[in-house]
Amino acid sequence: MSTLASPAIRVQPRTAWLLLAAGVLLTLLLGVAVVGRHGPPAPPFNGLIAFGRYDGAQDESIPYTIWPDGSHLHRVQAEAAANAFWSPDGRWLSMTDRVMHPDGTAAHDLHIDTSRMSVGCVDWSPDGERFLCQGSNDTDPSVRGLYTIRATDGGDLVRLTTAPAGTDDLPFAYSPDGSTIVFARIAVGEPRGQLYLVGADGTDLRPLGSIPSGAADWMPDGQWLLVASNYRLYRMDAVTGATTPVVQPADPEALMVNPHVSPDGTRILFISQVDGQKDLFQMRLDGTDVIHLTTDPANEYFTDWGVHPLDG
């Protein structure tokens, strides 16, 4: 049987051991300093807000961005585009059939298959891979339902749901982990209906709650939803459907629609009607510290709140 010879042991002088120990200690201290300086990952940043403003000449909405304090209003493009929504990293805005930087540069078109139906998308999956969309066709109701498409080019149309006869499936948002989608199943022509959840692969369809809804968004923890129903806002448990009203203490009768939760989960972006016009607002989750963002006579639509840097 062969044996392996033991390597020779080098004896380090005392001074060398002291220097080595000092080096290890210095390394540890530097490591602590680095961890202390950087700390845990930074929480999501409340960056630019995107929205649509109605343009009478085009009879459609024009995409804009604005800072959360109501300053730095910027028109993204002159052409009409509905449903401007942010990529998870805040670098891109998607609008109808186009994706671009929020300053309007690097635009590229999506090649969505609309041979059988119109396809309108509303949300980006958290992994940045796909868009959540609605398929509709007035002459062929069989295609009505939820779909997803590839975010890079608009291809790979995948069907998730089939709306029953006389209804439409109106998509709202992916859950923070990307596993679940919230949407409303509404009677054709109606503004709100029964909330549903469905898996991102189209499985596990289930109704949620009992209030009719026309818009919903996820809280960052994935345990709660922010829901609009009959011009009021509610926090809804994503498991039980139990609701808690969100009321502005300074104006308990305020009418609010189209809510979105800020990226850090501390504030609510919404639209409210003031003197006959629909303006953009944001406030804390408890309804306090209301900030009136826009006052243009034209109505605002299609809001979303991303993480794009305010000065980027």
Image (cartoon, rainbow, N blue to C red):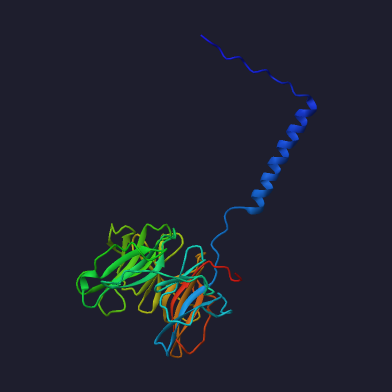
Query: Which corner quadrant of the image does residue 191 belong to?
Result: bottom left
User: What residue appears at the point 71 percent right and 21 percent down from the top-left corner?
Assistant: 10
Image spot of residue 303 (x, y percent): 45, 75
User: What residue appears at the point 69 percent right and 48 percent down from the top-left corner?
Assistant: 33
Which residue is outermost to the left? 165
Residue 253, visible in the rendered structure: no
Q: Quadrant of the C terminus?
A: bottom right
Q: Nearer the viewer, residue 128 or 272?
A: 128
Image spot of residue 224 (x, y percent): 41, 63
Image spot of residue 181 (x, y percent): 35, 63
User: What residue appears at the point 33 percent right and 73 percent down from the top-left corner?
Assistant: 213
Residue 161, visible in the rendered structure: yes
In this rendering, position of residue 54 left or right of residue 159: right
In this rendering, position of residue 106 left or right of residue 178: right
Image spot of residue 246 (x, y percent): 44, 73
In this rendering, position of residue 15 left or right of residue 234: right
